[in-house]
Image (tube, rainbow, N blue to C red):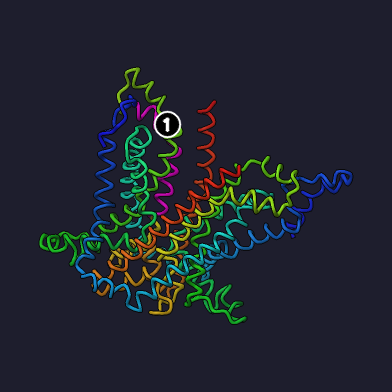
Amino acid sequence: MTLTVATTTEQLPAAARPAHAARRDPRAEPWLVRAFIIGFAVLFLSLFVVLPLLLVFSSALSKGIGFYLAALNDPEAWAAIRLTLITAVISVGLNLVFGVAAAWAIAKFEFRGKTFLVTLIDLPFSVSPVISGLVFVLLFGAQGFFGPWLMAHDIHILFAMPAIVLATTFVTFPFVARELIPLMQEQGSLEEEAAISLGASGWRTFWLVTLPNIKWGLLYGVLLCNARAMGEFGAVSVVSGHIRGETNTMPLLVEILYNEYQTVGAFAIASLLALLALITLIAKTVLEGQIVEGQQSRDD
Amino acid sequence: MSGASKRSALPGFGLTMGLTLTWLSLLILIPLAGLFVKTTELSLSQFIGTVTSPRTLHALKLSFGLAFAAALVNLVAGLVIVWALVRYRFPGRRIFDAIVDIPFALPTAVAGVALTALFAQKGWLGEPLAAIGIKVAFTPLGIFVAMIFIGIPFVVRTVQPVLIDLDAELEEAAACLGASRWQTVTRVILPSLTPAILTGFALAFARAVGEYGSVIFIAGNLPNVSEIAPLLIVIRLSEFRYADATAIAIVMLLTAFLIIFVLNRLQRWAQTRALAIS
């Protein structure tokens, strides 16, 4: 109902001046087409995106808040939350350092094969998560390249935390670099060159000139990287071994509980992950505003 | 990499480039190369036998076919959604704009269980659909729905900036010259959007082909019916048939790269065409 109201009020000025009715905005569609397009967009997004999200929270709370909290306050749930947080901190930290280094090399210097390097950095995006896990099974599994050696030395990588961290880092590899490269390319290196010519060291220039300029973009990349790191399922599922209370991350625990028909428990953990996604989206929207503002104040 | 520019007065090229290449090689390139080394354990006839076995072929066809169809749906729906978001003002527009990113931000396992519960026999949508005889969960149709879900953001987000920046004068000129609105949209606006549309399509397609988490819950996972290729890789791994798993992975990777390469070419062709128009 509200939709039709909105479209008719936009039509009003034209209707109020019948003499100029022929001079309608050439870029506007008839109101029927307009209503159909808006209606389709709203309906499609509501059915495919809003409903599943609502269902997560409604299922998690279907037996009351007490049951919900009890499902979360479970040793297995805590172990999964802990593992997920540790994995995310390590993976995001590694990719943060890599992302800044890669962006510095790519945005501040000219060299041959740059486009190719950027394509390689983006590679993990076009690889199935399952394959991202598979490559580490091939390296560290019992039949893998390093498997026998690792077994002889009693080092556990596969079906333990190291492989979970590796797979997560692989999958989240491009996020930070991808955000920073276009941002730093656009900003150019005039400010840094000025600092260097005034005698500042490379590190000092980076901390005092570059970092303040890229901080919002950096945060944006870290945010997206973190969301993916905490939510990764396919790659981690392949390398985790699903050892209860030990190698289950939150998404893996969702799967296990769901398959055991512990619906409330599964959706309780899922609701935490959904909440993380929502917070990420809100923070992302705020940051996008900051990045645009930062660019504008630099341009002034 | 010795070709670093002499023009740049900034330090740190050696350090950052060294770090980048080392990290890239250790984490991404060497593990991926291992994939190709592993397949050499199979002879060519064994490799062909593995990837052309009926079960594998079915899984590959299902993954690629449904991903293509889902990306097509995303293309059409994405265009309508992006048009509504960019060209019209309606209550809740900003919220719906933000909502588009949810499939990207929501962990795939969460999306998987949510979609399954939604479309299951007694689910919010599953029950009314069952009443008219449509079964979604645990059928290939369920896989299709999950693939549509995860592909929603791609076309919208690639086309959105282009549509926002589109020169209004172009459309006005077309209208002044007597073009109908439909002609303006199909002959002036769409060609300018085509490169972005193709990029979005390729991204949605690539994502759907490899998708695992949001699909396996709703799929039903019956061999030769609703078993996707990534799941077959996982099954082969759990049977310790590493080389077989790797062979399927290689076919998936190469086919996906080939399709993305073709789409990239198409996109470049569309770009030069779009430039010629404007």
Q: If the image is split into quadrants, where does the C terminus of chain B sit?
A: top right
Please name the amino acid that badge 1 sits on: Pro
Q: Residue placed at 11% from the left, 59% from the top?
A: A153
Quarter of the view holding residue A289 = top right
Q: Is residue B127 above or below residue A14?
A: below
x and y, in percent, of residue A150 in the image? 14, 60
| Residue A213 is one of the magenta-drawn residues | yes
In x, y percent, where is residue A2? 73, 57
For residue B167, side relative to residue A109 (left or right): right
Provide the chain ID for the residue under circle 1.
A
Which region of the structure is painted magenta?
A204-229
Find residue A26 and report its horizontal and vertical position in percent: 74, 46
Q: Residue furthest left?
A: A152
The residue drawn where x is 27% and y is 66% is B246
Would you say residue B84 is visible in this rendering? no
Residue located 39% across and 71% down the image: B60
